[in-house]
Structure formats: C-alpha cells, structure tokens
Image (cartoon, rainbow, N blue to C red):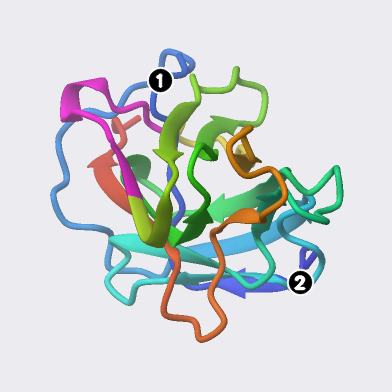
C-alpha cells in the first residue's frame, strides 16, 4: 500500500503538538465543497501488512475511516512471543483546497477482544505532522475476563485543536498500537485483541474540523 492509493476526502491534524505560527482566522463550520485528495505514502507495521489496510473518506468530507483486516495482538497459550504487540503507522499526503485548513476533532476506535481472567490489553494512538513532535499518546486499557466488541474514543475541545499549517504540505502520520498481556491467572489460554474487520463493518473513524486560512 505505497503511494498508489488516492482518496477523495480529508485527513486531519494533531491533538496536542505545537505548530508554526500561521493560525486560521475565522471558523468555517462546513467542510470545503471541493474534493480532498489523500495519497497514502506508506503503511508500516506488524498490525498492517501490505494490502491489509484501506482508507475511505466520507462524501461530505467530515470524516475518514481506516479499515484493517489483519490487526490482531495475542498472548498466552502457544502464541508467538512477539504477537503480544502489534502496531501500524500510516503516512498520508493530504491535498486540501487552497484557503482551508483542518484538524482532528475526535477519533473512534473499534474491534473485538477475548481476554481471559487476569489478562489485560491496551489500545494506543498518537498523531503528528512531518517535522513536528508526536502528540502525547492516548491509551485505553481493557481487563479480563472480557469477550465482546470494544470501542474507545479520543476527543479534543475546539480551543485545543491543533491545525495543519496553512499553505504548507506536510505529511500526516497516524500511529496505533494494540498490546495484550496474558497475566498469571490463565497463561495457558490465549487472550487476544483485534482492530480489524473481515466484513468491512468495523473501522476506525477520524472526525475532522475545518477553518479558513488567513488571507494574504
């Protein structure tokens, strides 16, 4: 999944990283009417082998989704010793209409977990622009016994959103991780956590906010 994947929507920016001093002027509640183009430059990580991650954008440019088909961490039983942690980094090139900038307002993560009694799992995510520091990771813990779908969300107040720099093309990176600890209660039994979907119904959703850039 290198740079050949073009998408017709928008990706967005960080939650907490400081950016250069160009800030948007007035609030633009509606997304731009023109198509947003996203190139997926690279996809790396044990949780997203080549061909197992796909990105799609909402027709109204208000959100984009990432769907995985092989994102599974597991521990216990006969699990591979390296399988307890899986990660994925998406490197995205975002082309937005001139005069607009964007930010990530919230993110919804979903999957399935089967955790034995005493087992634990975590889902973690962070975001950053090329050349900027990574955001502080948001981590969501889960405890066994658990055998059900799971959902976690990250959100940011409007005043704390960090916007893409106006007039500058910067690659946008999304880092995610799943981690499972079998614990000591039932180490002979497998515990696992997924962030994948075999039917396309389970996906990560990133919700975007938009503003006008200052006029020159």
Q: Is residue 143 above or below residue 57?
A: above
For the residue carrying disc 2, how many other residues have a C-alpha within 10 Å: few (<14), some (14-19), or many (20+)? Answer: few
Q: Position of residue 125 (x, y in %)?
A: 52, 37
- At a point 69% along the width and 48% down the height, the residue shown is 88
Q: Position of residue 193 (x, y in %)?
A: 56, 55
Image side of residue 212 versus residue 177, left or right: left
Q: Is residue 91 above or below residue 66?
A: above
Quadrant containing the C terminus in the rendered view: top left
Residue 154 in magenta? yes
Q: Secondary structure at mark 1?
A: loop
Residue 3 in magenta? no
Residue receiving disc 2: 4
Give the CA distance from mark 1 to mark 2: 30 Å
Q: Which mark is residue 87?
A: none
Residue 205, quarter of picture:
bottom left
- At a point 71% along the width and 55% down the height, the residue shown is 47
Residue receiving disc 1: 16
Q: Nearer the viewer, residue 82 or 45?
A: 82
**Can you see residue 48?**
yes
- At a point 33% along the width and 77% down the height, the residue shown is 59
């Amino acid at each position: 999944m290198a740079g050949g994947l073009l998408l017709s929507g928008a990706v967005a920016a960080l939650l907490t990283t400081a950016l250069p001093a160009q800030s948007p002027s007035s609030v633009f509640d509606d997304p731009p009417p023109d198509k947003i183009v996203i190139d997926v430059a690279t996809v790396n990580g044990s949780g997203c082998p080549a061909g197992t991650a796909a990105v799609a954008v909402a027709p109204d440019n208000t959100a984009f989704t990432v769907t995985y088909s092989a994102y599974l961490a597991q521990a216990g039983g006969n699990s591979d010793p390296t399988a307890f942690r899986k990660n994925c980094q998406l490197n995205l090139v975002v082309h937005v209409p001139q005069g607009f900038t964007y930010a990530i307002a919230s993110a919804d993560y979903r999957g399935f977990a089967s955790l034995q009694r005493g087992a634990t799992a975590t889902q973690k995510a962070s975001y950053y622009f090329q050349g900027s520091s990574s955001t502080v990771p948001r981590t969501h813990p889960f405890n066994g016994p658990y055998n059900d779908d799971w959902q976690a969300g990250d959100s940011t107040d409007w005043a704390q959103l960090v916007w893409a720099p106006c007039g500058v093309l910067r690659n946008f990176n999304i880092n995610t991780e799943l981690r499972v600890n079998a614990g000591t209660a039932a180490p002979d039994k497998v515990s696992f956590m997924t962030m994948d979907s075999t039917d396309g119904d389970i996906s990560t959703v990133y919700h975007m906010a938009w503003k006008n850039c200052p006029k020159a």
